[in-house]
Image (tube, rainbow, N blue to C red):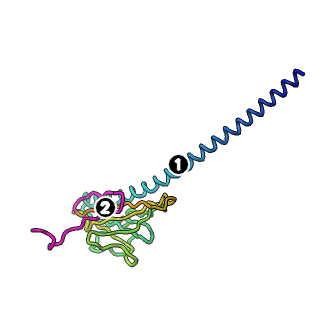
Amino acid sequence: MRKRHYEQRHSRIGAFTFAELLVVLVVISLFVLMAQIHLFGVLRENTFKAQVQEFVATMQMAVNAAAETGRRYEVTIDLDEQSYTLREYTLPELQAENPEEEIILQNNFAESCRVVQVLFDDLTQTDEQYRVANFRVGPVGWQSGGKIVLLDISDGSKGEWQPYSVVVGRLNRIVRLEKGDVQLLRPKTKNELPF
């Protein structure tokens, strides 16, 4: 009888332990699932930020190299291909005879980062016909300023995509990233100047 009582008690304890084990496994699984969801969100956000920072660094590299070497460079942004190319050019106009020799860097934007518009400070902008924008820089600075508007589409669940603007100024050598679709300062014409 004592043996039977011990077996019943031991089997109840074993069953209780198995139930506890199942509950613990379910709780751990939920924590892992929540951590994965959070991690994927962080990785998507970092992918956009990494893409934009890499693009800004390329623009900054072009202007710094032009100032240091005295050469001219061009960053070409292709809205259809969602790509950009940095190249050095030596001819007055960049010719397509052998463009592969001049390419320094070529990169594509990731799925989470979309270029939607380029607006120059002379109000020339990309549209349905004009889908490639060229930013040229020489030893004295950028040929023209402007902004490149990018969308962070990494978090499409909210339905709102966050715009960011990469701003290129004619008068300074700093390429900056700003949140939102910023207002572009443009040069004044002779008629607009008070003196």
Q: Position of residue 115 (x, y in %)?
A: 41, 66
Tell whether position 180 is magenta: yes
Which part of the image, by quadrant, shows the N terminus? top right
Does 20 sit above or below residue 107? above
Relative image position of residue 122 (x, y in whole percent):
26, 72
Which of the 4 image quadrants contains residue 107?
A: bottom left
Secondary structure beneath dot 1 equals: helix
Residue 90, magenta (yes or no): no
Alpha-carbon distance for marks 2 and 1? 31 Å
Q: Does residue 131 sit above or below 148 in this rendering?
A: below
Q: Residue at x 27, y 61 (%)?
A: 66
Is 156 positioned to the left or the right of 29 in the image? left
128 lies above or below 178:
below
| Residue tagged 2 | 167
The quarter of the picture where the C terminus appears is bottom left
- Which residue is found at the position 19% from the left and 69% from the top? 188
Magenta residues (range): 171-195
Q: Residue at x 42, y 54 (%)?
A: 49
Q: Residue at x 85, y 24 (%)?
A: 5
Upstream in sequence: badge 2 or badge 1: 1
What is the three-letter code of the residue carrying label 1? Leu
Query: Label 2: how many residues lie within 10 Å, few (<14), some (14-19) or many (20+)?
Result: many
Q: Quick one: which residue is furthest to the right in this view?
A: 1
Residue 105 point in image, percent of width and height: 39, 62
Near mark 1 (Cα within 10 A), the count class, few <14, some 14-19 or many ≥20, is few
Specify the amino acid type for callout 2: Val
Dominant SS of magenta comes to loop
Q: Nearer the viewer, residue 20 or 64?
A: 20
Dots 2 and 1: beta carbons under 8 Å?
Answer: no
Q: Secondary structure at mark 2?
A: strand
Q: Which mark is residue 39?
A: 1
Residue 69, percent from left and from top: 26, 59
